[in-house]
Image (cartoon, rainbow, N blue to C red):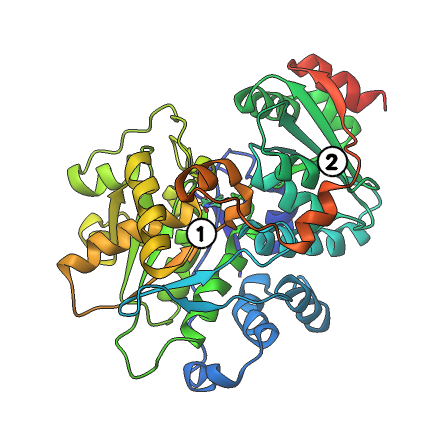
Amino acid sequence: MIYKSLNKKAPDVSFREAAIQGQAPDKGLYYPEYIPKLEEDFLEELPHLSKADIGFKVMKPFVAGTIPDDVLFNIVDETTNFPFPLVPVNNSNIYALELFHGPTLAFKDVGARFMSRCLGYFAKEKSEKITVLVATSGDTGGAVAHGFHNVPGVEVVILYPSGRVSPVQEKQLTTLGGNITALEVSGNFDDCQRMVKDAFMDEELNKKLFLTSANSINVARWLPQQLYYFFAYQQWDKNALPPVVSVPSGNFGNICAGMVAAASGLPIKHFIAACNANDVVPRFLQSGHYKPEQAVATISNAMDVGSPSNFVRVLELFQNDIQELKFALSGYTVSDDTTRETISKVYTQYKYLLDPHGAVGYKALEMYLEQFPERKGIVLETAHPVKFPDSIEEITGKPVEIPGSVAGIMKLEKKSIELDATSDALKSWLLNR
Ligand SMILES: *Cc1c(COP(=O)(O)O)cnc(C)c1O
Protein backbone atom coordinates (compact mmCIF):
# COMPACT_ATOMS: atom_id res chain seq x y z
CA MET A 1 0.00 0.00 0.00
CA ILE A 2 1.37 3.38 -0.95
CA TYR A 3 0.02 6.82 -0.14
CA LYS A 4 -0.47 9.56 -2.73
CA SER A 5 -0.71 13.28 -2.16
CA LEU A 6 -4.13 14.56 -3.21
CA ASN A 7 -2.39 17.63 -4.68
CA LYS A 8 -0.62 15.19 -7.04
CA LYS A 9 2.69 17.08 -6.98
CA ALA A 10 4.64 15.04 -4.43
CA PRO A 11 6.23 11.59 -4.58
CA ASP A 12 4.28 8.54 -3.36
CA VAL A 13 5.29 7.37 0.12
CA SER A 14 4.87 4.44 2.51
CA PHE A 15 2.64 4.53 5.62
CA ARG A 16 5.82 5.16 7.61
CA GLU A 17 6.78 8.27 5.63
CA ALA A 18 3.19 9.56 5.54
CA ALA A 19 2.92 9.22 9.33
CA ILE A 20 6.28 10.90 9.96
CA GLN A 21 5.66 13.79 7.56
CA GLY A 22 1.99 14.44 8.33
CA GLN A 23 1.33 16.54 5.25
CA ALA A 24 2.91 15.98 1.81
CA PRO A 25 5.56 18.47 0.65
CA ASP A 26 3.08 19.87 -1.93
CA LYS A 27 0.72 20.63 1.04
CA GLY A 28 -1.64 17.87 -0.10
CA LEU A 29 -3.23 15.25 2.15
CA TYR A 30 -1.96 11.71 1.85
CA TYR A 31 -4.53 9.18 0.64
CA PRO A 32 -4.24 5.37 0.26
CA GLU A 33 -3.85 4.14 -3.33
CA TYR A 34 -6.85 1.82 -2.85
CA ILE A 35 -9.35 0.83 -0.16
CA PRO A 36 -8.68 -2.76 0.97
CA LYS A 37 -11.68 -5.13 1.08
CA LEU A 38 -12.56 -6.97 4.31
CA GLU A 39 -11.73 -10.69 4.32
CA GLU A 40 -14.70 -12.77 3.19
CA ASP A 41 -15.55 -14.26 6.60
CA PHE A 42 -14.76 -11.08 8.56
CA LEU A 43 -18.39 -10.11 9.26
CA GLU A 44 -19.28 -13.64 10.31
CA GLU A 45 -16.36 -13.70 12.74
CA LEU A 46 -16.92 -10.17 14.00
CA PRO A 47 -19.14 -11.04 17.01
CA HIS A 48 -16.32 -13.19 18.44
CA LEU A 49 -13.37 -10.89 17.78
CA SER A 50 -11.67 -8.81 20.48
CA LYS A 51 -11.18 -5.08 19.90
CA ALA A 52 -7.47 -5.74 19.34
CA ASP A 53 -8.27 -8.46 16.76
CA ILE A 54 -10.56 -6.05 14.91
CA GLY A 55 -8.03 -3.24 15.08
CA PHE A 56 -5.28 -5.48 13.81
CA LYS A 57 -7.29 -6.86 10.89
CA VAL A 58 -8.54 -3.42 9.86
CA MET A 59 -5.25 -1.53 10.19
CA LYS A 60 -2.83 -4.17 8.85
CA PRO A 61 -3.40 -3.47 5.12
CA PHE A 62 -3.04 0.28 5.71
CA VAL A 63 0.17 -0.08 7.73
CA ALA A 64 1.35 -2.44 5.00
CA GLY A 65 4.39 -4.03 6.58
CA THR A 66 5.99 -0.82 7.89
CA ILE A 67 5.35 -2.09 11.44
CA PRO A 68 5.86 -5.80 12.32
CA ASP A 69 2.63 -7.73 13.09
CA ASP A 70 3.38 -8.32 16.77
CA VAL A 71 4.18 -4.63 17.34
CA LEU A 72 1.07 -3.54 15.43
CA PHE A 73 -1.09 -5.91 17.48
CA ASN A 74 0.25 -4.37 20.72
CA ILE A 75 -0.32 -0.88 19.36
CA VAL A 76 -4.01 -1.48 18.53
CA ASP A 77 -4.48 -3.35 21.80
CA GLU A 78 -3.18 -0.39 23.84
CA THR A 79 -4.99 2.11 21.62
CA THR A 80 -8.41 0.56 22.28
CA ASN A 81 -8.09 -0.61 25.90
CA PHE A 82 -11.21 1.14 27.19
CA PRO A 83 -14.94 0.55 26.55
CA PHE A 84 -16.91 1.76 23.50
CA PRO A 85 -20.47 0.94 24.58
CA LEU A 86 -23.49 1.23 22.29
CA VAL A 87 -26.30 2.53 24.49
CA PRO A 88 -30.02 2.78 23.62
CA VAL A 89 -31.19 6.37 24.11
CA ASN A 90 -34.84 6.87 23.12
CA ASN A 91 -36.26 3.34 23.55
CA SER A 92 -36.97 3.02 19.85
CA ASN A 93 -34.62 3.96 17.04
CA ILE A 94 -31.64 5.96 18.37
CA TYR A 95 -28.49 4.53 19.98
CA ALA A 96 -25.36 6.34 21.15
CA LEU A 97 -21.88 4.94 20.61
CA GLU A 98 -19.98 6.45 23.53
CA LEU A 99 -16.50 7.42 22.44
CA PHE A 100 -15.58 9.30 25.61
CA HIS A 101 -14.28 6.57 27.90
CA GLY A 102 -10.62 7.15 27.02
CA PRO A 103 -8.08 9.02 29.17
CA THR A 104 -9.04 12.54 27.98
CA LEU A 105 -12.79 11.85 27.67
CA ALA A 106 -13.14 12.61 23.94
CA PHE A 107 -12.95 10.48 20.82
CA LYS A 108 -9.61 11.92 19.73
CA ASP A 109 -7.89 9.56 22.17
CA VAL A 110 -7.96 6.64 19.71
CA GLY A 111 -6.34 8.53 16.84
CA ALA A 112 -3.81 10.20 19.11
CA ARG A 113 -2.85 6.97 20.89
CA PHE A 114 -2.45 5.06 17.64
CA MET A 115 -0.43 7.81 16.00
CA SER A 116 1.85 8.35 18.99
CA ARG A 117 2.68 4.67 19.23
CA CYS A 118 3.42 4.45 15.50
CA LEU A 119 5.69 7.49 15.68
CA GLY A 120 7.32 6.05 18.77
CA TYR A 121 8.11 2.88 16.81
CA PHE A 122 9.38 4.80 13.79
CA ALA A 123 11.47 7.11 16.02
CA LYS A 124 13.49 4.09 17.17
CA GLU A 125 14.82 3.71 13.64
CA LYS A 126 15.78 7.38 13.48
CA SER A 127 18.81 8.93 15.13
CA GLU A 128 17.08 12.30 15.48
CA LYS A 129 14.50 13.16 18.08
CA ILE A 130 11.05 13.93 16.59
CA THR A 131 9.38 17.12 17.83
CA VAL A 132 5.61 17.11 17.53
CA LEU A 133 4.25 20.63 17.37
CA VAL A 134 0.52 21.09 17.86
CA ALA A 135 -1.89 23.99 18.34
CA THR A 136 -5.07 23.21 20.24
CA SER A 137 -8.40 24.84 20.94
CA GLY A 138 -8.99 22.25 23.65
CA ASP A 139 -9.49 18.55 22.93
CA THR A 140 -6.68 17.79 20.48
CA GLY A 141 -3.92 18.96 22.83
CA GLY A 142 -5.00 16.74 25.71
CA ALA A 143 -5.41 13.66 23.54
CA VAL A 144 -2.04 14.22 21.88
CA ALA A 145 -0.31 14.94 25.20
CA HIS A 146 -1.64 11.74 26.78
CA GLY A 147 -0.96 9.70 23.67
CA PHE A 148 2.69 10.74 23.49
CA HIS A 149 3.47 10.90 27.20
CA ASN A 150 6.70 8.94 27.89
CA VAL A 151 7.09 7.82 24.26
CA PRO A 152 10.89 7.66 23.81
CA GLY A 153 12.42 9.67 20.97
CA VAL A 154 9.42 11.98 20.70
CA GLU A 155 8.99 15.36 22.29
CA VAL A 156 5.65 17.20 22.23
CA VAL A 157 5.16 20.96 22.29
CA ILE A 158 1.54 22.12 22.65
CA LEU A 159 0.41 25.69 22.06
CA TYR A 160 -2.85 26.71 23.66
CA PRO A 161 -4.62 30.07 23.97
CA SER A 162 -4.36 31.39 27.52
CA GLY A 163 -7.72 31.63 29.29
CA ARG A 164 -9.65 30.12 26.40
CA VAL A 165 -9.70 26.42 27.17
CA SER A 166 -11.95 24.84 29.82
CA PRO A 167 -10.42 24.08 33.25
CA VAL A 168 -10.48 20.32 32.63
CA GLN A 169 -8.87 20.78 29.24
CA GLU A 170 -6.12 23.00 30.68
CA LYS A 171 -5.21 20.48 33.38
CA GLN A 172 -5.05 17.73 30.77
CA LEU A 173 -2.50 19.80 28.83
CA THR A 174 -0.34 21.11 31.62
CA THR A 175 0.05 18.44 34.28
CA LEU A 176 1.86 15.59 32.55
CA GLY A 177 5.42 16.95 32.39
CA GLY A 178 8.21 14.69 31.07
CA ASN A 179 8.36 14.92 27.28
CA ILE A 180 5.25 17.14 27.13
CA THR A 181 5.61 20.94 27.24
CA ALA A 182 2.62 23.28 27.25
CA LEU A 183 3.12 26.78 25.86
CA GLU A 184 0.46 29.16 27.13
CA VAL A 185 0.08 31.73 24.37
CA SER A 186 -1.27 35.21 25.10
CA GLY A 187 -3.57 35.14 22.08
CA ASN A 188 -6.36 33.09 20.53
CA PHE A 189 -6.45 29.71 18.78
CA ASP A 190 -5.85 31.27 15.36
CA ASP A 191 -2.63 32.83 16.73
CA CYS A 192 -1.48 29.42 17.98
CA GLN A 193 -2.26 27.82 14.65
CA ARG A 194 -0.46 30.54 12.71
CA MET A 195 2.65 30.21 14.93
CA VAL A 196 2.73 26.44 14.32
CA LYS A 197 2.28 26.87 10.56
CA ASP A 198 5.07 29.45 10.46
CA ALA A 199 7.36 27.09 12.35
CA PHE A 200 6.77 24.33 9.78
CA MET A 201 7.68 26.80 7.00
CA ASP A 202 10.81 28.13 8.73
CA GLU A 203 13.96 26.90 7.02
CA GLU A 204 16.34 27.39 9.93
CA LEU A 205 14.03 25.60 12.37
CA ASN A 206 13.54 22.68 10.01
CA LYS A 207 17.29 22.32 9.53
CA LYS A 208 17.90 22.14 13.25
CA LEU A 209 14.87 20.14 14.39
CA PHE A 210 12.76 17.30 12.99
CA LEU A 211 9.31 18.84 13.27
CA THR A 212 6.02 17.09 12.60
CA SER A 213 2.37 17.82 13.32
CA ALA A 214 -0.26 15.75 15.11
CA ASN A 215 -3.45 17.05 13.57
CA SER A 216 -6.12 14.91 11.96
CA ILE A 217 -4.68 15.15 8.46
CA ASN A 218 -1.98 12.69 9.58
CA VAL A 219 -2.94 9.25 8.22
CA ALA A 220 -1.91 7.61 11.50
CA ARG A 221 -4.49 9.73 13.32
CA TRP A 222 -7.16 9.61 10.63
CA LEU A 223 -7.36 5.92 9.66
CA PRO A 224 -7.70 4.23 13.09
CA GLN A 225 -10.95 6.17 13.56
CA GLN A 226 -12.49 3.50 11.32
CA LEU A 227 -12.48 1.22 14.35
CA TYR A 228 -15.43 3.03 16.00
CA TYR A 229 -17.69 1.94 13.17
CA PHE A 230 -16.60 -1.69 13.51
CA PHE A 231 -17.12 -1.56 17.30
CA ALA A 232 -20.59 -0.08 16.68
CA TYR A 233 -21.54 -2.76 14.16
CA GLN A 234 -20.25 -5.51 16.44
CA GLN A 235 -22.87 -4.43 19.00
CA TRP A 236 -25.67 -3.92 16.44
CA ASP A 237 -28.59 -6.36 16.12
CA LYS A 238 -27.64 -8.47 13.10
CA ASN A 239 -31.30 -9.10 12.27
CA ALA A 240 -32.01 -5.39 11.92
CA LEU A 241 -31.28 -3.26 8.86
CA PRO A 242 -27.73 -1.85 8.85
CA PRO A 243 -27.52 1.35 10.90
CA VAL A 244 -27.57 4.96 9.77
CA VAL A 245 -24.63 6.69 11.50
CA SER A 246 -24.72 10.36 12.50
CA VAL A 247 -21.30 11.95 13.07
CA PRO A 248 -20.83 15.33 14.77
CA SER A 249 -18.38 16.83 12.29
CA GLY A 250 -15.81 19.61 12.21
CA ASN A 251 -12.75 18.72 10.19
CA PHE A 252 -14.50 15.65 8.72
CA GLY A 253 -11.75 13.20 9.68
CA ASN A 254 -13.99 10.95 11.76
CA ILE A 255 -16.86 10.68 9.26
CA CYS A 256 -14.45 10.18 6.37
CA ALA A 257 -12.83 7.28 8.24
CA GLY A 258 -16.30 5.78 8.67
CA MET A 259 -16.92 6.07 4.96
CA VAL A 260 -13.63 4.27 4.29
CA ALA A 261 -14.81 1.46 6.61
CA ALA A 262 -18.08 1.25 4.66
CA ALA A 263 -16.19 1.22 1.36
CA SER A 264 -14.15 -1.73 2.65
CA GLY A 265 -17.40 -3.69 3.19
CA LEU A 266 -18.77 -2.76 6.63
CA PRO A 267 -22.60 -2.59 6.40
CA ILE A 268 -23.68 0.99 7.06
CA LYS A 269 -26.91 2.17 5.52
CA HIS A 270 -26.18 5.89 5.38
CA PHE A 271 -23.99 8.62 6.90
CA ILE A 272 -25.13 11.91 8.37
CA ALA A 273 -22.77 14.88 8.60
CA ALA A 274 -24.10 16.70 11.67
CA CYS A 275 -22.82 20.28 11.79
CA ASN A 276 -23.28 23.36 13.93
CA ALA A 277 -23.45 26.83 12.31
CA ASN A 278 -20.19 25.93 10.54
CA ASP A 279 -22.02 24.03 7.83
CA VAL A 280 -20.06 24.29 4.55
CA VAL A 281 -20.70 20.62 3.79
CA PRO A 282 -24.48 20.45 4.41
CA ARG A 283 -24.82 23.57 2.24
CA PHE A 284 -22.64 21.99 -0.44
CA LEU A 285 -24.81 18.85 -0.47
CA GLN A 286 -27.86 21.07 -1.02
CA SER A 287 -26.54 23.57 -3.51
CA GLY A 288 -23.55 21.90 -5.17
CA HIS A 289 -21.42 24.95 -4.27
CA TYR A 290 -18.47 24.49 -1.93
CA LYS A 291 -17.84 27.72 -0.08
CA PRO A 292 -15.42 27.62 2.90
CA GLU A 293 -15.97 30.40 5.43
CA GLN A 294 -14.33 31.87 8.54
CA ALA A 295 -15.28 29.70 11.49
CA VAL A 296 -17.90 31.09 13.89
CA ALA A 297 -17.93 30.27 17.62
CA THR A 298 -20.60 27.86 18.92
CA ILE A 299 -21.22 25.79 22.07
CA SER A 300 -19.96 22.68 20.22
CA ASN A 301 -16.56 24.33 19.82
CA ALA A 302 -14.57 21.30 18.64
CA MET A 303 -16.67 21.50 15.45
CA ASP A 304 -16.02 25.18 14.77
CA VAL A 305 -14.23 24.65 11.48
CA GLY A 306 -14.97 26.85 8.47
CA SER A 307 -12.89 24.93 5.98
CA PRO A 308 -12.88 21.20 6.83
CA SER A 309 -9.52 19.84 5.72
CA ASN A 310 -10.57 16.19 5.38
CA PHE A 311 -13.48 16.83 3.02
CA VAL A 312 -11.15 16.46 0.00
CA ARG A 313 -10.68 12.87 1.16
CA VAL A 314 -14.45 12.31 1.14
CA LEU A 315 -14.62 13.67 -2.42
CA GLU A 316 -11.70 11.45 -3.46
CA LEU A 317 -13.45 8.38 -2.03
CA PHE A 318 -16.41 9.13 -4.31
CA GLN A 319 -14.18 10.17 -7.20
CA ASN A 320 -15.90 13.55 -7.13
CA ASP A 321 -19.21 11.98 -8.16
CA ILE A 322 -21.61 14.20 -6.22
CA GLN A 323 -24.69 12.09 -7.02
CA GLU A 324 -23.05 8.97 -5.57
CA LEU A 325 -21.89 10.97 -2.57
CA LYS A 326 -25.41 12.26 -1.87
CA PHE A 327 -26.66 8.68 -1.98
CA ALA A 328 -24.31 7.83 0.90
CA LEU A 329 -24.26 11.09 2.86
CA SER A 330 -26.79 13.66 4.12
CA GLY A 331 -25.95 16.88 5.93
CA TYR A 332 -27.84 18.78 8.62
CA THR A 333 -27.24 22.10 10.36
CA VAL A 334 -28.14 22.44 14.03
CA SER A 335 -28.13 25.86 15.74
CA ASP A 336 -26.91 26.48 19.31
CA ASP A 337 -30.51 27.04 20.46
CA THR A 338 -31.64 23.72 19.01
CA THR A 339 -28.56 22.03 20.52
CA ARG A 340 -29.52 23.33 23.99
CA GLU A 341 -33.15 22.26 23.49
CA THR A 342 -32.00 18.80 22.43
CA ILE A 343 -29.77 18.33 25.49
CA SER A 344 -32.62 19.40 27.73
CA LYS A 345 -35.29 17.31 25.97
CA VAL A 346 -33.23 14.10 25.82
CA TYR A 347 -32.20 14.51 29.45
CA THR A 348 -35.77 15.10 30.62
CA GLN A 349 -37.41 12.40 28.50
CA TYR A 350 -34.80 9.66 28.53
CA LYS A 351 -32.40 10.57 31.38
CA TYR A 352 -29.52 10.53 28.90
CA LEU A 353 -27.06 13.41 29.14
CA LEU A 354 -25.65 14.45 25.76
CA ASP A 355 -22.69 16.79 25.40
CA PRO A 356 -23.12 19.70 22.94
CA HIS A 357 -21.36 17.80 20.11
CA GLY A 358 -23.35 14.62 20.56
CA ALA A 359 -26.52 16.73 20.77
CA VAL A 360 -25.86 18.14 17.29
CA GLY A 361 -25.50 14.57 16.04
CA TYR A 362 -28.64 13.42 17.88
CA LYS A 363 -30.81 16.21 16.45
CA ALA A 364 -29.51 15.61 12.91
CA LEU A 365 -30.30 11.89 13.23
CA GLU A 366 -33.76 12.66 14.56
CA MET A 367 -34.49 14.89 11.55
CA TYR A 368 -33.27 12.18 9.18
CA LEU A 369 -35.35 9.45 10.85
CA GLU A 370 -38.48 11.57 10.50
CA GLN A 371 -38.04 11.15 6.75
CA PHE A 372 -37.10 7.44 7.00
CA PRO A 373 -39.07 6.11 9.98
CA GLU A 374 -38.36 2.45 9.18
CA ARG A 375 -34.62 2.93 9.78
CA LYS A 376 -32.57 2.97 12.97
CA GLY A 377 -29.50 4.96 13.74
CA ILE A 378 -26.41 5.48 15.86
CA VAL A 379 -25.10 8.86 16.99
CA LEU A 380 -21.41 9.04 17.83
CA GLU A 381 -21.21 10.67 21.28
CA THR A 382 -17.79 12.26 20.79
CA ALA A 383 -17.13 13.84 24.20
CA HIS A 384 -18.07 13.46 27.86
CA PRO A 385 -20.46 16.21 29.05
CA VAL A 386 -18.05 17.06 31.90
CA LYS A 387 -15.73 18.63 29.35
CA PHE A 388 -18.33 21.36 28.87
CA PRO A 389 -19.69 21.76 32.43
CA ASP A 390 -20.89 25.36 32.08
CA SER A 391 -23.21 24.84 29.12
CA ILE A 392 -24.54 21.57 30.52
CA GLU A 393 -25.24 22.98 33.97
CA GLU A 394 -27.02 25.96 32.43
CA ILE A 395 -29.28 23.66 30.42
CA THR A 396 -30.06 20.90 32.93
CA GLY A 397 -29.84 23.06 36.07
CA LYS A 398 -27.55 20.49 37.70
CA PRO A 399 -23.77 20.22 37.94
CA VAL A 400 -22.26 17.41 35.89
CA GLU A 401 -20.90 14.53 37.92
CA ILE A 402 -17.11 14.48 37.68
CA PRO A 403 -15.61 11.08 36.84
CA GLY A 404 -12.76 9.85 39.04
CA SER A 405 -10.08 10.23 36.38
CA VAL A 406 -10.84 13.95 36.07
CA ALA A 407 -11.22 14.60 39.79
CA GLY A 408 -7.60 13.41 40.24
CA ILE A 409 -6.19 15.62 37.54
CA MET A 410 -7.91 18.76 38.87
CA LYS A 411 -5.74 18.54 42.01
CA LEU A 412 -2.45 18.50 40.09
CA GLU A 413 -0.36 21.60 39.61
CA LYS A 414 -0.49 23.34 36.24
CA LYS A 415 2.90 23.77 34.55
CA SER A 416 3.03 25.98 31.47
CA ILE A 417 5.43 28.40 29.83
CA GLU A 418 3.94 31.75 28.90
CA LEU A 419 4.69 32.92 25.40
CA ASP A 420 3.89 36.00 23.31
CA ALA A 421 1.62 35.31 20.35
CA THR A 422 4.35 35.77 17.74
CA SER A 423 6.12 33.32 15.49
CA ASP A 424 9.48 34.79 16.52
CA ALA A 425 8.75 34.05 20.15
CA LEU A 426 8.04 30.42 19.31
CA LYS A 427 11.10 30.12 17.10
CA SER A 428 13.48 31.50 19.68
CA TRP A 429 11.94 29.33 22.39
CA LEU A 430 12.36 26.20 20.22
CA LEU A 431 16.00 27.04 19.41
CA ASN A 432 17.12 28.17 22.85
CA ARG A 433 15.66 25.59 25.20
C1 LIG B 1 -12.72 16.98 17.08
C2 LIG B 1 -14.11 16.78 17.56
C3 LIG B 1 -15.21 16.67 16.66
C4 LIG B 1 -15.05 16.80 15.16
O1 LIG B 1 -14.42 15.70 14.59
P1 LIG B 1 -13.82 15.79 13.10
O2 LIG B 1 -13.12 14.50 12.87
O3 LIG B 1 -12.88 16.98 13.11
O4 LIG B 1 -14.97 16.02 12.17
C5 LIG B 1 -16.48 16.40 17.19
N1 LIG B 1 -16.66 16.32 18.54
C6 LIG B 1 -15.65 16.45 19.41
C7 LIG B 1 -15.95 16.37 20.88
C8 LIG B 1 -14.34 16.68 18.97
O5 LIG B 1 -13.34 16.81 19.87
Q: Residue at x 29, y 53 (%)?
A: 272
Element class at badge 2: helix
Residue holding disc 2: 174
Q: Residue at x 34, y 82 (%)?
A: 238
Residue 361, position in %: x, y? Answer: 34, 50
Q: Can residue 17 be seen in this view?
A: yes
**Which part of the image, by quadrant, shows the C terminus?**
top right
Among the 4 quarters of the image, the one containing residue 113: bottom right
Residue 298, position in %: x, y? Answer: 39, 31
Residue 7, position in %: x, y? Answer: 43, 38
Is 248 in front, or is 391? 391
Q: Is residue 129 above or below residue 227?
A: above
Q: Is residue 425 above or below residue 92?
A: above
Q: In this view, does 424 lie above or below 291?
A: above
- Which numbered dot is residue 254? 1
Is 407 in front, or is 182? 407
Q: Residue at x 47, y 81 (%)?
A: 46
Residue 313, position in %: x, y? Answer: 39, 47
Q: Which amino acid does label 1 sit on?
A: Asn
Q: Is residue 244 above or below residue 70?
A: above
- Which numbered dot is residue 70? none
Q: Which amino acid does label 2 sit on?
A: Thr
Q: How crowded is mark 2: few (under 14 residues within 10 Å), some or many (20 or more)?
A: many
Q: Mark 2 to mark 1: distance in Å? A: 26 Å
Among the 4 quarters of the image, the one containing residue 276: top left
Q: Does the residue labelled 1 lie within 8 Å of ligand 1?
A: yes
Is 263 in front, or is 342? 342
Q: Residue at x 70, y 13 (%)?
A: 424
Precedes in sequence: disc 2 or disc 1: 2
Q: In this view, does 414 lie to the left or right of 55?
A: right
